[in-house]
Structures are given as C-alpha cells and as structure tokens.
Image (cartoon, grey):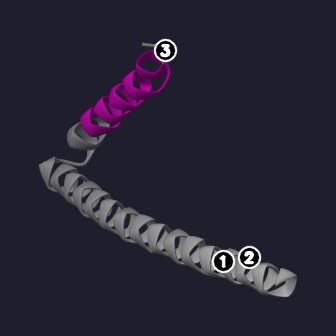
Amino acid sequence: MRFASGFIIPIILEFGLISATVGLYFGPIYLVNMYGMLGIYSVFTYKYSKTWQDYIRDWFKEGKKSEFFMNESVINYETVKYF
C-alpha cells in the first residue's frame, strides 16, 4: 500500500494532469503524439530490459560453469598430488 500511495498514485495523477494540459492547450493531435511516443518508449524499454536480463543471466551461468571447472581442476590436482 505504501508503494502504491508513494509511487504509483502520484505518477498516475501527474500523467493525468499533463494529458489534460496538453489536450486543452495544444489539441488532440499533440495528445495522440504524446501517447504514441510513450507507447513506443515503453515497448522499447521493455524489450531492451528483457534482452539485458537474458544477457546477464547467461553471463552468470557461464561464470558458474567456469568456476565449477576451476574448482574441479583444483580438487583433482590436490587428489593426484596426495597419491
């Protein structure tokens, strides 16, 4: 509830006020343009974030793999050294 009242509600209120101001003073063409650009920006941000998350996930997987092989090599070296 704190997140909604402190973050979501002010954004919705501000967006509504800006939309009303742009629609009133500049007309519906600018309002449609604003909504279109917001939509394009939202889609781009979502796709870019998803791509970046996939890249980071793969990067960590490769790091875990290399760490596993490094630890396995050290363990094998120590085992052979003792025998």
Residue lying furthest top in this view?
A: 1
Pinpoint residue 24: horizontal percent, then vertical percent: 22, 37
User: Cα distance, mark 1 to mark 2?
Assistant: 5 Å
Q: Is residue 8 above or below residue 62?
A: above
Segment tinted magenta in the rendering: 3-20
Q: Where is residue 80 drawn, in percent x and y?
A: 78, 86
- Give the residue displayed 26% in from the left and 61% down from the top: 43
Query: Label 3 to label 1, Cα distance in Å?
Result: 48 Å
Mark closest to the chain's N terminus, 3 or 1: 3
- Relative to 10, 35 lies left or right: left
Residue 53 shown left or right of residue 26 in the figure: right
> Pointer 2: residues within 10 angstroms few (<14), some, or many (20+)?
few
Circle nearer the N terminus (3, 2): 3
Indicate whether 63 appears above or below 15: below
Is 38 a magenta residue? no
User: How many tags in the picture?
Assistant: 3
Are circles 1 and 2 on residues that touch, CB within 8 Å? yes
Q: Nearer the viewer, residue 12 or 21?
A: 12
Amino acid under disc 3:
Arg
**Secondary structure of the residue carrying numbered label 1:** helix
Image quarter (top left, top right, bottom left or bottom right) of the N terminus: top left
Task: Give me the C-alpha separation between circle 3 and circle 2.
Answer: 50 Å
Q: Main secondary structure of the magenta part?
A: helix
The disc at residue 75 is: 2
Q: Position of residue 6 (x, y in %)?
A: 50, 20
User: Which label number is shown at residue 72?
Assistant: 1
Determine the residue located farthest toward the right in the rendered image.
82
